[in-house]
Image (cartoon, helix red, strand yellow):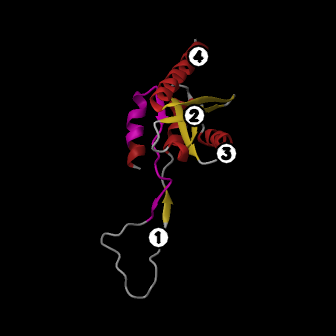
Amino acid sequence: QNMLEAVQAQAPNATVFIATAAVADWRPANSAEHKIKKDGSGQVPALGFVENPDILATVAASERARAGALYCVGFAAESENLLAHASAKRARKGVPLLVGNIGPATFGQDDNALLLVDAHGHRELPRAPKTELGRQLVAEIARRLGMAATARS
């Protein structure tokens, strides 16, 4: 909730929103003020969860994003079926661009490979240092923003 509020406070000043944070999908429904102690019964305490707000979907559904004034980019770190999962996530979140990768293969590594998924299909950015992929991604977003500005003129 805190991150959603921080993002919503800054979004009116942004042209691009790149959602790279891996915010947990769920949080504990209740918290204890003090340690939950064993009572000798062997009963396991009940642990319930509630869904966290979907920051990317919320921002992508905003008036500015729907009007094209805020370009939203999502990320998907998957363990398999990257294209299928990334395409489904892009549609579900309502973003024009989703960047996917095979997460476990790149954790702790200096390089990565990315898959850019949009409404027209997908394009691979081959394995390269992560800093280089970041530059390529920013250049691609800038190109897309330039195309959008030209289309609006």
* In front of the other: 66 or 133: 133
**Label 4 vs label 2: CA separation?**
22 Å
Task: Name the residue that disc number 3 marks.
Answer: 81
* Quadrant of residue 14 within the rendered picture: top left
Q: Are marks 3 and 2 in contact (CB under 8 Å)?
A: no
Is residue 47 something one can see in this rendering? yes
On the image, the x and y values in percent for residue 75 come to 54, 39
Question: On screen, 65 above or below 57?
Answer: above
Label ID, residue 114: 2
Residue at 49% across / 68% down in the picture? 48
Which secondary structure, mark 1? loop
Which secondary structure, mark 3? loop
**Quadrant in which the C terminus appears:** top right
Q: Residues within 10 Å of mark 3 (few under 14, many from 20)?
A: few
Point out the tag, 4 or 2, that comes first from the N-terminus.
Answer: 2
* Quadrant of residue 33 within the rendered picture: bottom left
Point out the tag, 4 or 3, that comes first from the N-terminus.
Answer: 3
Amino acid carrying mark 3 in the image: Asn
Which secondary structure, mark 4? helix
Task: Name the residue that disc number 4 marks.
Answer: 147
Magenta stretch encompasses residue 117: no
**Label 1 vs label 3: CA separation?**
31 Å
